[in-house]
Image (cartoon, rainbow, N blue to C red):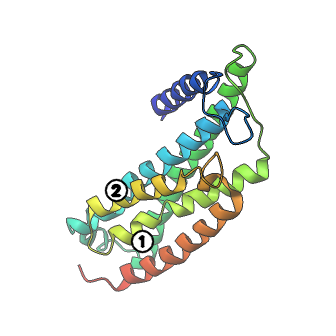
Amino acid sequence: MIIMNVIVLLLSVFTSTLLADPSSEMNPTGIAFQLTTSELALLITRAVLIVWQAVLIVQIIIEEYKTKTITVLFTYPYSKKQLILVKFLLVFLLTATFAVFSTLFQEVSTYLLSQRLAFVTFASESLGSLLIVLISNICLGFLPLFIGMKNSSVIATIVSSLVIVVIGSNSQASPTGLLGIPIVSLFLGAVSVLLMVVTYRSMLIKEI
């Protein structure tokens, strides 16, 4: 987690030096288009977060269904509902920890660097907006579970997370990507929660 955040920070700082170039892309009004270093860092972090969550889903849920080792777990004196919900909760808590740590790391690091380096820029975001996007993105990260559980496919789970990253990072609507827009992020997160409920119910009746 720490290594990933350091790499993201360095990549964001390096990209900021390119965007700070006066010869960089100009928009129709003639004003140089520039994404702040902190926005870049959060954009990349959100993308990595979704893929990392898909990897967790594969390791904690999909693999056990694919290899049928989940049947051993079902022999324990707990209901099937409890065991599945605990797995969901584990993925959520691990991802939430990762997300909170990464967001704090990137925000604090870019702010401190912006005080010393002219090409490193920092744009503060409201706490409410950050929380909405963060929680919504975590919920969206469960979408690969719905796709992967269809055929207990590891490849489908990972590929679907990459597709979400590509679509969510689209900067046509906003420089920070679709996932950076609270309303859009909240809507996508709500859809993912509904699909997660559908997946949960199918897992309860799924024959192994």
Give the mark toward the camera: 2 or 1: 2
Count of all numbered marks drawn on residues in the image: 2
Residue 45's spot in the image, x, y percent? 54, 41
Up-down relation of residue 202 to residue 74 (above or below): below
Per the image, the residue denoted by label 1 is 84
- On the question of residue 71 being in view, the answer is yes
Q: Residue furthest bottom?
A: 205
Report whether 162 appears left or right of 155.
right
Looking at the rendered structure, the kind of residue marked 2 is Ile
Indicate the secondary structure of the residue bearing disc 2.
Answer: helix
- On the question of residue 79 being in view, the answer is no
Per the image, the residue denoted by label 2 is 158
Please give the name of the residue rendered at 68% of the width and 56% of the height, measured from the top-left corner: 181
Residue 74's spot in the image, x, y percent? 31, 73
Q: Earlier in the sequence, mark 2 or mark 1?
A: 1
Residue 123's spot in the image, x, y percent? 75, 35
Q: Residue furthest top?
A: 116
Please give the name of the residue rendered at 58% of the width and 67% of the height, measured from the top-left corner: 188
Up-down relation of residue 119 to residue 205 (above or below): above
Report whether 170 appears left or right of 114.
left
Front one among 189 and 95: 189
Up-down relation of residue 113 to residue 81 (above or below): above
Check whether the beta carbons of the residues at disc 2 and disc 1 lie within 8 A of each other. Answer: no
Front one among 75 and 185: 185
Up-down relation of residue 117 to residue 128 (above or below): above
Real-space Cα distance between discs 2 and 1? Answer: 20 Å
Looking at the rendered structure, the kind of residue marked 1 is Ile
Front one among 123 and 172: 172
Indicate the secondary structure of the residue bearing disc 1.
Answer: helix
Residue 110's spot in the image, x, y percent? 67, 27
Question: Dividing the image into 4 quarters, which one contains the C terminus?
Answer: bottom left
Q: Quadrant of residue 19?
A: top right
